Image (cartoon, rainbow, N blue to C red):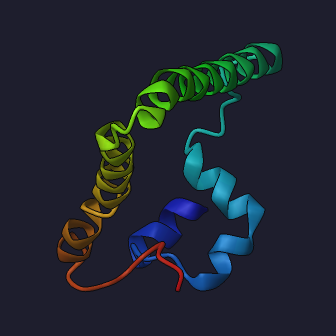
């Protein structure tokens, strides 16, 4: 059913973002169940959260002594790196707009 809709119009309508059935069908065209079990997914999520928390704690313990000694470039480096990573997430947007010939899909203002 959704394949005919996609052939008629490649762009999603605003109402499609609130329709769970359409979202799940487009995410999984074959409607096959996920090969990941709930426990595996949960363990992976917990491991990633622990990893990211560990990285943040490590950065705190590494940067704090240098900052108290008057060295501020590590804090600046972390801020610049965060800004660059955030901006890099928006790089694909103009290319997606060009690919769809000016139609903006999936960006809410």
Question: Where residue 45 sits in the image (x, y, percent)?
Answer: 70, 25
In the figure, residue 63 lies in which quadrant? top left
Q: As drawn, which residue projects farthest toward the right?
A: 39
Up/down of 12 relative to 32, above or below: below
Question: Where residue 20 sits in the image (x, y, percent)?
Answer: 76, 62
Up/down of 66 relative to 105, above or below: above
Q: Residue at x 64, y 74 (%)?
A: 16
In the image, taking residue 38 as reference, residue 33 lies left or right, namely left
Q: Residue at x 58, y 38 (%)?
A: 30
User: In the depicted view, which residue is nearer to us: 52 or 105?
Assistant: 52
Q: How many marks?
A: 0
Q: Residue at x 54, y 23 (%)?
A: 55
Up/down of 82 relative to 64, above or below: below
In the image, taking residue 17 as reference, residue 101 lies left or right, namely left
Up/down of 105 relative to 80, above or below: below
- For the N terminus, the image quarter is bottom right
In the image, taking residue 54 as reference, residue 109 lies left or right, namely left
In the image, taking residue 98 as reference, residue 22 lies left or right, namely right
Question: Where residue 15 sits in the image (x, y, percent)?
Answer: 67, 82
In the figure, residue 28 lies in which quadrant? top right
User: In the depicted view, which residue is nearer to us: 72 or 26?
Assistant: 72
Question: Where residue 76 sits in the image (x, y, percent)?
Answer: 33, 48
């Amino acid at each position: 059913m959704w394949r005919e809709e996609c052939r008629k119009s490649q762009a999603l309508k605003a109402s499609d973002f609130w329709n769970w059935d359409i979202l799940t069908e487009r995410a999984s065209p074959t409607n096959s169940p996920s090969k990941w079990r709930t426990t595996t997914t949960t363990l992976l999520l917990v491991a990633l959260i622990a990893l990211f928390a560990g990285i943040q704690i490590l950065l705190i313990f590494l940067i704090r002594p240098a900052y108290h000694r008057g060295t501020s470039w590590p804090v600046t480096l972390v801020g610049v790196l965060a800004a660059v990573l955030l901006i890099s997430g928006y790089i694909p947007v103009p290319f997606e707009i060009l690919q769809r010939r000016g139609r903006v899909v999936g960006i809410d203002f």
